[in-house]
Image (tube, grey):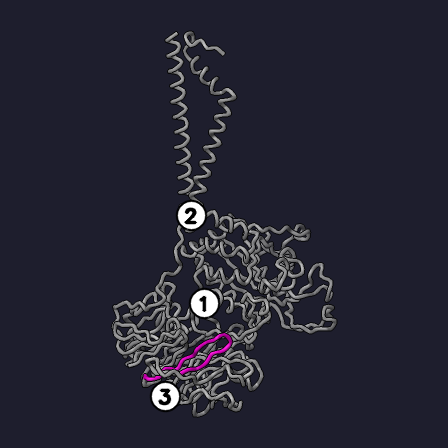
Amino acid sequence: METRTMDYKNYRQNTTDKKHKFKIKYIILILVLAIFVYLVIRYFSLLSAILNPKALQSYNTKTVNLTNSYNLKGNLYFVKNNNLWDITGKKAIQITHTNDISDIAISKNGKKVAYVHFHTNFSNLYQMNINGTNVTRIVNWRDPNINNELWSATPTYSPNGQYIAYLTNLEKIFTGVHVAGMGIFQISANQTYLSSDQALGPNYYGETDLVNPNPYTGGDAGVTWPNPNFILYTSYIYWTANLAQPDSQIMLYDFATGQSYPVTPLKSEAMQPRLSPNGKYLAFLERKGNNNANLYTMKFNLQNILTHTETSSFNTYKKTLQTVYVGIESHPTWSPSGNNLAFMTLTNNSFDIAVVRVTINNKKNNLNFSDLQHVTRGSTLDSTSKMYWMN
Amino acid sequence: MVIDFDNLQHGQHQDVQSSIMKSPRRKKRRWLGCLSIFVIFILIIFLLLLKSGYVQVISDLFQITGNTIKQTKVEQTLKYKYDKSNTFTNILILGSDSDAKFNPQHLLTQTMMIASINPSQKKIYLISIPRDFWIKIPGYTLNGGYSKFDTVSEIGGIQLTRQVVEQYFGIRIDYYAWIGLNGFINVINKFGGVYVTPTHPVMDWAYPNDLTGNPQLINNLINLYISPAPQYMDGFRTLEYVRSRHGDLQGDFGRAKRQQQILTILKKKLETTETISAIPSLFNSLTQYVRTDMSIPNIISLATMAKGMGSTPIQSIILSPPKYSSLSTTTNYDPTLGQYITQDIVEPNWPAINNLFSKLYGN
């Protein structure tokens, strides 16, 4: 009887142990399966990314990050977060803190800054000292005498600093016609905003109408005034008989004749011209493919441009076109000596400043570009505003 | 049951054991054990996924995806002229004007594109259909049955739009994807914005200011200016860039070109891991603004397909004048206004379009 009891106890003990082992086995199996499924999910690239979200952009948007490898001679002015900045030596200085500055222009003596303040529906033209003081409004396109609010953009100083040329759609209020682009107007840099009771007329603020967008053009942009005798600008053209797609070309407005002449051929999609200090080379961008804006240079031969024929000025373009940088670039600017070319370039989701050394290759009669260096990184600069490199 | 343990033979022990374990009570216990183990297993997986936010993502994703719309009777019997061997995956992309102005099921589609992917032949097409294409719409009674293409969705929803596209262009539409204005803004923002070299300065004196949330401003218009310089655009700016048409001398065709430019930039963005990582918050913010009949496996399959075709250029086509259409006007009686109205339309050049589709898709 005792034996039977013992056997039964042993049997119960055995079965209980086996049941425990059975449960433990299942728990281990479940855990292994759970870990396996979790790892599979993590392994799968799409879901892995879901489980590990990363920020698309992690730049410090408040400061300018200098690379410290470039010692900049002179002052390089640019815009970031709608404020004026200056890089000199190995320092970046924020000049304004008003968050209202776009489309800057610096006078040739380096003392004045013209800029545009964009609002919803309109934009006004202002001027201030280079240190951000003495702000004066030059045009107010929200004047009660004007039915329609207007735009002003991309100002540029005349070489003597007495005038500002800028873009505006001022024609609209005189003609009543909606012009698809803006024309180039000239205005005195010494005036301040006049009272609103001034009579409305073609020269509302004393403007001189230099270049009107022609019918079936897309207007003008990127104005610079490198020489007392001419202005360089970009003309956008499209929807003509032979052009199914938008196009742009660099044009020269000659003050002597009041005429505009093409500098680059149609279908070059050229824009943002910047003449070298010696007036011999032109830096500019060309729109390529779906979204690129590559940086190029070409020789600048004023005489060929003014006596424009297909074979003269466009031959200069065809024969002297040189690629400087490929990607998405913006607003090239020459150093005061002409030995360096600075430009904004899109790198790792940020527009930053790069500089390339420029030397003349006498043998090949062209330019050499070398020693490309990034001046800033991850600084998300304003690529729609021009840069100015001053002494 | 009495068991004589003393007289059990070799092997009989196990039989007894198994008979005990196989008893109904034991079976029930085992079943309950398995169930509890399964529940624990599911719970562990759920907790792991919940912790990572994946459950919310899936929930949001289901609101966007799987919005299947039944084939019409015409579609069921339709014989497609092109791509008969189904080598392309064709997606109808529809973009609508302000969601607040229209019945959500019957929106005016300002943007209509056919996106076609053929991984084996390494081909990607993006074909824009002009909104003013003047076509005969099945079941429509006014104007002799004719209306602009963008009204098809207003008349018969996405179902009729898909049928009309299939009938006129002779290809099968596998999926549709509809996006509203706020959805577009959110998509671009979640992708971290885009870097764009505009094709020209954009100036629009009548840009709709309908996204302020203020119902009184729905029909309000503002001035718009976008510089032509290469630049960063957030979602709102990108929408302005692709939506503006009044200052564009090419009107709707110029707008279609800008839309294709942004889609091509987005395709490049999709190829990066950083963008994929933004997907959770993307789905979370898109539930009200995006609809598609694609399922989650469909989307994953397409994303994998697109990633595999990374360097394949997109062939962008706009069915614009002078090759594929011509500009015209038509005067018709509008019963709602009680008068005749003249409107600008785009007459499709069907022989040229058929020739194009035959070349692109093959017979």
Q: Earlier in the sequence, mark 1 or mark 2?
A: 2
Position of residue A262 measured from the top left corner of the image (x, y, whole percent): 45, 82
Q: Is any atom of residue A370 visible in this view?
A: yes
Q: Mark 1 lies on which chain?
A: B
- Quarter holding the N terminus of chain A is top left
- The residue singled out by tag 3 in the image is A161
Q: Which chain carries label 2?
A: B
The alpha-carbon separation of the residues under discs 1 and 2 comes to: 31 Å
Determine whether the residue tagged by mark 1 lies in a helix, strand or loop: strand
- Label 1, residues with CA under 10 Å away: few <14, some 14-19, many ≥20: some
Determine whether, in the image, residue A90 is placed left or right of residue B12.
Answer: left
- Mark 3 or 2: the one toward you: 2
Marking on residue B233: 1
Q: Which chain carries label 3?
A: A
Marking on residue B52: 2
Which is nearer the eye, B126 or A363?
B126
Which segment did they paint magenta? A110-126
Position of residue A217 measured from the top left corner of the image (x, y, whole percent): 52, 79
Position of residue A301 measured from the top left corner of the image (x, y, whole percent): 37, 84
Q: Tell me what residue is drawn at x 40 percent, y 32 percent.
A: A27
Residue B183 on the magenta segment: no
Determine whether, in the image, residue B218 is placed left or right of residue B37.
Answer: right
- Mark 1 or 2: the one toward you: 2
Determine whether the residue tagged by mark 3 lies in a helix, strand or loop: loop
Determine whether, in the image, residue A143 is placed left or right of residue B341.
Answer: left
Marking on residue B262: none
Asked whether the beta carbons under mark 1 and mark 2 sit within 8 Å of each other, the answer is no
